[in-house]
Image (tube, rainbow, N blue to C red):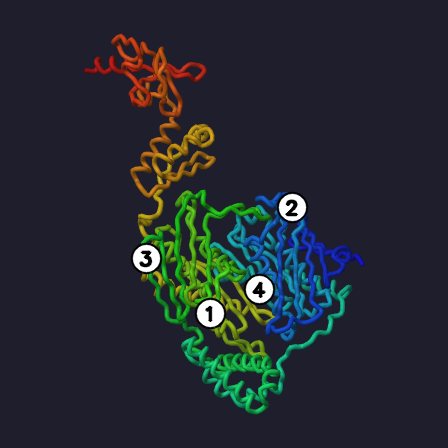
């Protein structure tokens, strides 16, 4: 049955349609926001997936290039693997939804958001996030929503909900907020050093709109929502848990407090072996095997309870730190001799090596997506190999987590990267995680700042990143403990991972993941305060003591730049037919050359003399010769009536036989040959641009002067 629901969002119509398309999905919603159209379909398997101990939710945000009137590039002419932007949106859709499914639910659930049409003023990402919540809410899939989401900008000192394309070009803030009617569920932000109070105000403004949208979806659910289906519960066997808790709770509480991660992991392995042996001795091997899944789940549950109890009741952390204490910090720069910049940043047992590389502006990354952004000059990549957590697993390329963490570090650093005019390089930073025990993305921000400074990139200000965690009382949400600089165990068993990157002036990036139903404004405000204090400490007490400002000179192994500007009418001459001229310059000098449409020319070279030689060749080609000017030229062709000389500007002039010398010359070949470099004077440039030269007049001028 076709139904349409309409509301207003940021002064524009938001229409949700259902009942016309994708009738076999558990829930389907077509979202129209302006001329942006996104189809969101949700499905669930009828039976739970065997052999897993997690909820198998998958979210795919599919960018179709037909939505912006493009045909995909490449040989196949069809969309390939999702772009990084699409993966980041998939993660943003996933994060607020996941905590609202039942904890004991093991059926596969798929959310697919397909972008059908894009109006640049109306975000398809927001449409997809709203559509996913609506589709799940009206479906028969067990889901505790609704949620909703909006984008927020900060334009001309004003908070703007769902900024238009024109406003996005001027905004100092790109913020996505998702939440329920009661609380904030997800925050993702890139910002130009925004103060904490403005960021909090932007989040509150977003929540006002989110509440309205949640009411809108709830009304939709009340009218057409399906009853939720019954599912097989995978809650742990209470008797098994009670028996393990009674016998091993005290030992678990002690073993989990080992400061060293490896020791703690060894403790947990030994405890698991002892518990299994206890059950074998009491119930026999066959019954123990049948209970193995419940035994493993019970141990996980008991470990979680022990860690949370320690933090909540004793304000004590597993590694003995105070709740606002940062793990031991150290950093080092210039470790790798041949790279352009490098830094090693260590926080506790988390360690990241960041490497900066400088390249030509033309080496910036090209983006082929539905977004208005077509390229980016600063690129950050994050790698998380299995050895960083002590596992033996082959690398299979970056997954969604790696792409997400790399994008977060990139967002944090983009606001301090110098403009192309100030520093005409493409810049790539790669963060290699060498050891992981929590907050590797924030260590990447710190390490990458140091690597950029080591490479001589004149960043505006150094950036640091830190994460806070949260443990809340299940019976009293107002009773909670916030933890500064969470390690792996606290992230694993805690309720929040609130990551903030920024400078001394303000926030440049935020990413918030939670496992509970949402965060209050008080928690968000405290997280901002904690992270601001921690960033200041990391910058002043550690990073800036290692390197206080960017190096004055770039690495000798990085390409140095000589730049000039030529008349745009001369660009064609410098490039030459089929690239002949520019390839000749590159071949003779070994440099790399970028020529912009506005006439700016960048010459990249590791040899200063070759760079100067290339500059002279370009300036000679781009130069317009004038009548009366004396120039150097190369003989290109000998004819009976004279010689053709290539002069600056890439043009040829005729040196007539009568103008070679005041002495009589029988044959041109007697005094000139192809390849000779001679000084000539521009005698005349006719109406057709033909150049006549003289060499004789130079001799006469010389004799007169002497």
Instruction: Tell me if mark 3 has few (under 14), some (14-19) or many (20+) residues whose alpha carbon lies within 10 angstroms of its own.
Output: some
Residue 147 appears in which quarter of the rendering?
bottom right
* First-in-chain label (3 vs 2): 2
Q: Return the mark for residue 486.
A: none
Instruction: Tell me if mark 1 has few (under 14), some (14-19) or many (20+) residues whose alpha carbon lies within 10 angstroms of its own.
Output: few
The outermost residue toward the left is 706
- The residue that disc 1 covers is 391
Vertical placement of 399 versus 634: above or below?
Answer: below
Residue 176 appears in which quarter of the rendering?
bottom right
Q: Nearer the viewer, mark 3 or mark 4?
A: 3
- The residue that disc 3 covers is 334
Q: Nearer the viewer, mark 4 or mark 2?
A: 2
Q: Return the mark for residue 66.
A: 2
* First-in-chain label (1 vs 2): 2
* First-in-chain label (1 vs 4): 4
- The residue that disc 4 covers is 186
Q: Is residue 20 left or right of residue 528?
A: right
Q: Is residue 30 left or right of residue 92?
A: right
Can residue 198 be seen in this snapshot?
A: no
Residue 86 position in % (x across, y down): 58, 55
Residue 552 position in % (x across, y down): 31, 50
Inter-mark Cα distance, 3 to 4 = 37 Å
Task: Report the quarter where the N terminus lies.
Answer: bottom right
* First-in-chain label (4 vs 2): 2
């Amino acid at each position: 049955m076709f139904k349409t629901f309409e509301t207003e969002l940021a002064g524009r119509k938001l229409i949700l349609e259902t009942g016309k398309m994708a009738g076999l999905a558990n829930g389907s919603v077509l979202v129209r926001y302006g001329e942006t159209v996104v189809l969101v379909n949700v499905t669930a398997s009828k039976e739970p997936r065997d052999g897993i101990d997690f909820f198998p939710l998958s979210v795919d945000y599919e960018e179709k290039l037909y939505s912006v009137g493009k045909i995909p590039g490449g040989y196949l002419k069809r969309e390939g693997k999702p772009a990084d932007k699409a993966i980041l949106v998939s993660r943003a859709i996933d994060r607020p939804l996941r905590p609202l499914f039942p904890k004991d639910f093991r059926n596969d659930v798929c959310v697919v958001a397909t972008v059908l049409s894009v109006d640049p003023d109306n975000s398809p990402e927001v449409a997809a996030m709203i559509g996913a919540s609506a589709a799940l809410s009206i479906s028969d899939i067990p889901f505790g929503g609704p949620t909703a989401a909006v984008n927020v900008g900060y334009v001309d000192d004003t908070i703007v909900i769902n900024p238009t394309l024109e406003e996005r070009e001027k905004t100092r803030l790109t913020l996505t907020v998702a939440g329920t009617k009661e609380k904030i569920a997800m925050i993702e932000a890139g910002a130009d050093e925004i103060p904490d109070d403005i960021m909090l105000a932007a989040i509150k403004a977003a929540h006002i709109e989110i509440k309205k949208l949640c009411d809108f979806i709830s009304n939709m659910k009340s009218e057409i929502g399906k009853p939720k289906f019954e599912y097989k519960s995978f809650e742990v066997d209470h008797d098994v848990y009670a028996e393990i808790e009674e016998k091993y709770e005290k030992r678990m509480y002690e073993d989990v407090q080992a400061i060293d991660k490896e020791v703690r992991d060894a403790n947990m392995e030994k405890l698991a072996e002892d518990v299994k042996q206890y059950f074998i001795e009491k119930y026999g091997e066959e019954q123990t095997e049948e209970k193995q899944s419940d035994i493993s789940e019970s141990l996980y549950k008991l470990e979680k309870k022990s860690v949370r109890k320690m933090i909540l009741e004793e304000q004590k952390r597993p590694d003995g730190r105070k709740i606002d204490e940062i793990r031991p910090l150290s950093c080092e720069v210039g470790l790798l001799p041949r790279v352009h910049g490098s830094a090693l940043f260590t926080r506790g047992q988390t360690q990241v090596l960041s490497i900066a590389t400088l390249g030509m502006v033309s080496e910036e990354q090209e983006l082929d997506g539905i977004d208005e952004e077509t390229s980016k000059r600063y690129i950050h990549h994050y790698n998380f190999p299995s050895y960083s957590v002590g596992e033996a697993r082959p690398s299979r390329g970056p997954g969604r987590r790696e792409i997400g963490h790399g994008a977060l570090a990139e967002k944090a650093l983009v606001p301090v990267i110098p403009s192309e005019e100030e520093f005409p390089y493409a810049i790539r930073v790669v963060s290699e995680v060498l050891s992981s025990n929590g907050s590797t993305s924030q260590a990447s921000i710190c390490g990458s700042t140091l690597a950029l400074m080591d490479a001589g990139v004149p960043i505006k200000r150094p950036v640091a990143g830190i994460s806070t965690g949260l443990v809340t009382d299940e019976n009293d949400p107002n009773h909670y403990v916030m933890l500064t600089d969470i390690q792996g165990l606290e992230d694993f068993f805690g309720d929040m991972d609130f990551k903030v990157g920024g400078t001394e002036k303000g926030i440049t990036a935020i990413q918030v993941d939670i496992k509970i139903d949402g965060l209050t404004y008080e928690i968000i405000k405290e997280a901002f305060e904690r992270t601001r204090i921690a960033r200041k400490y990391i910058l002043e007490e550690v990073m800036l003591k290692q390197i206080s400002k960017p190096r004055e000179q770039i690495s000798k192994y990085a390409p140095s730049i000589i730049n000039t500007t030529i008349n745009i009418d001369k660009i064609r001459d410098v490039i030459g037919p089929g690239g002949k001229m520019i390839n000749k310059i590159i071949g003779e000098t070994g440099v790399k050359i970028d020529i912009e449409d506005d006439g700016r020319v960048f010459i990249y070279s590791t040899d200063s003399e070759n760079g100067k030689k290339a500059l002279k060749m370009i300036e000679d080609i781009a130069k317009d010769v004038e009548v009366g000017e004396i120039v150097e030229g190369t003989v290109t062709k000998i004819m009976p009536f004279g010689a053709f000389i290539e002069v600056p500007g890439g043009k040829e002039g005729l040196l007539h036989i009568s103008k070679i010398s005041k002495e009589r010359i029988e044959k041109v070949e007697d005094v000139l040959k192809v390849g000779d470099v001679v000084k000539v004077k521009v005698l005349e440039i006719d109406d057709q641009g033909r150049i006549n030269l003289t060499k004789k007049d130079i001799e006469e001028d010389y004799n007169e002067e002497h």
